[in-house]
Image (tube, grey):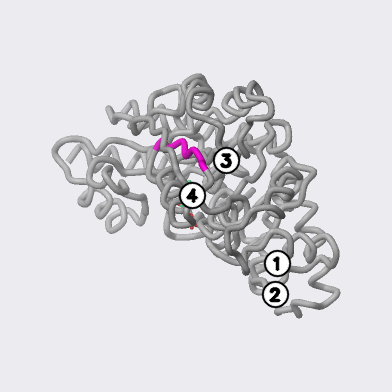
Amino acid sequence: MDQPSQTKNLRIPGPTPLPPEVRRALAAPIIGHRSPELQSLMSRVRRRLKQVFQTEHEVLVFTSSGTGGMEAAVANLLSPGDRVLAVSVGVFGERWVRLAEAYGAQVDRLAFPYGEGADPEVVLAWLRGEGPYRALFITHNETSTGVTNDLGALAAALGDLGDERPLLVVDAISSLGAIDLRTDAWGCDVVVTGSQKALMTPPGLALVSVSSRALAASGQARNPRFYWDFQRAMEYATGRNQTPFTPSVTLLQGLDVALGLILDEGLGERFARHEALASYFRQGAAALGLEFLAREAVRSNAVTALKVPSGITAEALVGRLRDEYGIEVAGGQGPLKGQIFRVGHMGWVTQEELADVLRALREILNR
Ligand SMILES: Cc1ncc(COP(=O)(O)O)c(C=O)c1O
């Protein structure tokens, strides 16, 4: 991939910069949403999505932000009163709690301190003691704390539960396409991502993989749903290469090209590149004396959360990076507001752009 041409160094953890190939695709003429052109585009997008999600099952496309995909999971899998477990390691883990509660589920919340990952043994012990649950909701990469949960280990632990294994529902909004996530091999029933992060496409599409078990559950579950209905979306996808309702045709055109770039790079190469870039950035940040929010073993390859050093406020730091250097980073969310700042390094990003951030930080901290 060549050097990004944006003058601004957009280093928030999504939306992320777009490769020129994707920007060009977004300028293509609109095609009819029931046309043969759309069907062939959709057929390719479906095939590519399955490869990037590492699944044989269908990946449904909804026109919405990522949270819409999360809501689709809750609406389709649960009935009012179902017991579910939300494993939370940050602000986005809490979103599962609120969503499931909004749909009338009985939600147990197993939370780990900010900066920690979910311990698979603790989760398994909890499930053994408090289960069974209809579903377990978890965030793969917690964007608010810069933590990646060891989903592979967690999924393996769930295997020990036999028939009592809950549906495994994963928010992979800030990981899919940057950090390895083996949907089928790990037995993930629903994996949700959004177009605007490692998939290098503008905001506006939610992509949702649905296992056979999840599809069967959606046929039984009694929560109300219409726009988000998995069964109807599945019929349209597999039967007609369409979506039930008018999709964002333009975003599909962009996503198609972005997925092609991702597969050309190769998933393994891509995960390794993210690891190398993240490690470069972490080393540079540590050399500046900055402290990480996340414990070392669980630091994310998609986003780094750094503590705001003494002598400057988060607001001033973020403001100076933006106004004096054209670098946009994110502050902290919820209880972490004012405590940390976050630098995204997922998708279309180069080492040079991260070096720019480190140089700017060094100058600001020296002053
Ligand atoms: C881990 C995670 N979950 C959920 C969301 C919400 O996604 P959206 O804003 O696309 O609805 C985000 C967005 O930053 C996220 O990083």
Answer with left or right where residue 218 lies relative to residue 171: right
The residue sitting at 48% across, 43% down in the picture is 345
Label 2 vs label 4, nearer the camera: 4
User: Residue 133's x, y, as percent?
Assistant: 55, 36
Rendered view: 185 above or below 27: above
The span shown in magenta is 83-89
**Dot 4 amino acid type:** Ala
Upstream in sequence: badge 3 or badge 2: 2
Where is mark 2, residue-wise?
Answer: 28
Q: Which residue is mark 4?
A: 105
- The residue under label 3 is 135
In-front residue for pair 100/336: 100
Residue 270: x and y, percent? 64, 38
Question: 139 or 355, which lies in front?
Answer: 139
Residue 195 in percent (x, y) is at 59, 57
**In the rendered view, would you say 326 is above or below 142?**
below
Q: Is mark 4 within 8 Å of ligand 1?
A: no
Q: Which residue is mark 1?
A: 253
